[in-house]
Amino acid sequence: MRLGEVAELDSFRAEVREFLAAEAPSIPERAGFRSPEDAAEDKVRREWRAKLFEAGYLGADWPERFGGGTREWNPVLDLIVSEEVARAGLPPLTDQTHLAAFALLRFGTPEQQERFLPAIREGRETWCQLFSEPDAGSDLAAMRTVAAPLKGGGYRVDGQKVWSSNAAWAEFGFLLARTDTAAERHRGISAFIVPMSAAGLEIRPLREITGTEDFSEVFMEGVELGPDALLGGREDGWRVAMESLGAERAGLGAGGRRLRKLLDSMVELAREEGADGARPADSEEVRDRIAGFAAEIEINNLLVQQRLARELRGAERPSDLPIGKLVFSELNLAMVEYGMRLQGSRSLLTEGDPEARQSGRWQDEYLYARTFTVAGGASEIMRNIVAERALGMPREKRGG
C-alpha cells in the first residue's frame, strides 16, 4: 500500500472507525495526555490496549513471533489509527508503554523481548519513562542520576526523576542514568529497565494546577539492578533515548484530528450568544481568525503527510519530527488561547463545572496545551534542532 492509494486508505479508515464504534470502551474524553483516574480506569485501558494489539491496530509491524506481521503495514496506517482514536475521544496511543516497546524492539536482547513484549501486548504490564530531572528537563544531557557498577555485576542507582507520566500505575520504568560520570554530556549515559516496585524506589504523585495527578516524582536511593537490566549497550543510552523520543514526537506531531475537533468546538463556541445577545461569529475579525486556524491545520496535515512520504522512501530528514512536533504544539496552544478569549469570563470554568458550556473544557485545554509545548522536547529545543539541522545555522553554545 502506498501513500497515494486513496481508495485503500479510505477503506482501512472505515474499517478502523467501525471497529472503534463497536469495541471502544467508555473512557471519559478529557483534555491532554491524562493518566487513569483510578484502578478501574487503569484496568479498562489495559484491556483496551490488548484488544487493539489483538486486532492488529497496534503492533502489526512487530516480529511475527511477538504477534506482529498480521497485515501489510506502513506509517500511513499508523496515522489513520491514531486519527480515528482521537476522533472517537479515546486516550492517545503514543504513551510511555508504546515508547518502551519501541526501545525493546530496537535495542532489547532476545531475552528482554521475550520477557516484556508479550506482557505489553496482553495489557498485563505498563511502563513509565524515567528521563527528566529537576535540573534536566529539555536539557536531558544534564541529568545527574547515577548507575554505579557493582562488584558482583549489575548497578546501584541513585537519583531523582520528575514529570514521569503514569509512574503510579506502571510495573516498569524506562530509565536513563549516568554510568560514566567523567564523560562528556551526551556520553556516559545508559538505559535501563527498572521494576517500579524495587527496594529503594519511591513514587510521589504530583498534583498539578489542573487538580489531576498525571505525573510523579520518582526517588531512587540504592536501587540495585542486575546486569540484565541494561537496555542497549553500555554508554549507548543517548541513542536509545533519542530514537524513542522520535516515536513520541511523531505521535504529538500527528495531531491533525485533535486540532480539527478543537476547531469544530471553537466554531460552536463562536456561534453561542452572550449575555448581550451578540455572537462572536458575527464579528469579521473572529471569522477571519477561525478561518486562519483552519488553514494552519491543513498546513500541519500536509507536513505530516510529507514526512510520512519521505519515511516510505527512506528519505527522512533529521528536522522532520521536530518541525512536526513544533507546528502542532504551537498551533494547539494558539487555538486554545483564542478559545479562552471567545469565552470571556466563562473561561474561568473548568471541567465538571455544572454551569460550564462545552463542559468547561477550554481552561483545561489551555493548561494542557502548555504541556504539549514541553512534552517530547520543549519548543525552544525544537527550534534549535530545526535551525541547526535544517537551516545549517551555528550550534548553540552549551555549558558542560
Image: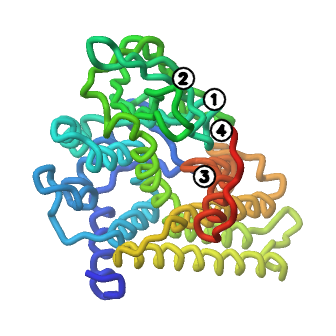
Say whether marks 2 and 1 touch (CB < 8 Å). Answer: yes
From the top left corner, tell me how far across and down residue 218 is, in percent. 50, 23
Residue closest to the eye, 5 or 291:
5
First reached walking from the N terminus: tag 2 or tag 1: 1
Residue 261 at what x, y percent from top left?
56, 67
Label 3 sits on a secondary structure element that is: helix
Q: Which mark is residue 160?
A: 2
The residue under label 4 is which amino acid type?
Answer: Thr
Query: In front here: 197 or 103?
Result: 103
- The crowd level at tag 2 (other Cα within 10 Å; few <14, some 14-19, many 20+) is many
Q: Earlier in the sequence, mark 1 or mark 3?
A: 1
Which residue does the numbered mark 4 point to in the structure image? 210
Q: Verify CB contact (< 8 Å) between mark 4 and mark 3.
A: no
The residue indicated by pointer 3 is 372
In the image, is residue 179 above or below residue 300?
A: above
Q: Earlier in the sequence, mark 4 or mark 1?
A: 1
Q: Nearer the viewer, mark 4 or mark 1?
A: 1
Which residue is labeled 1 in the image?
134
Query: Could you tell me how far apart the alpha carbons at marks 1 and 3 are, in whole angstroms?
Result: 18 Å
Question: If the image is split into quadrants, where does the N terminus sit?
Answer: bottom left
Q: Nearer the viewer, residue 215 or 393?
A: 393
Name the quadrant of the C terminus.
Answer: top right
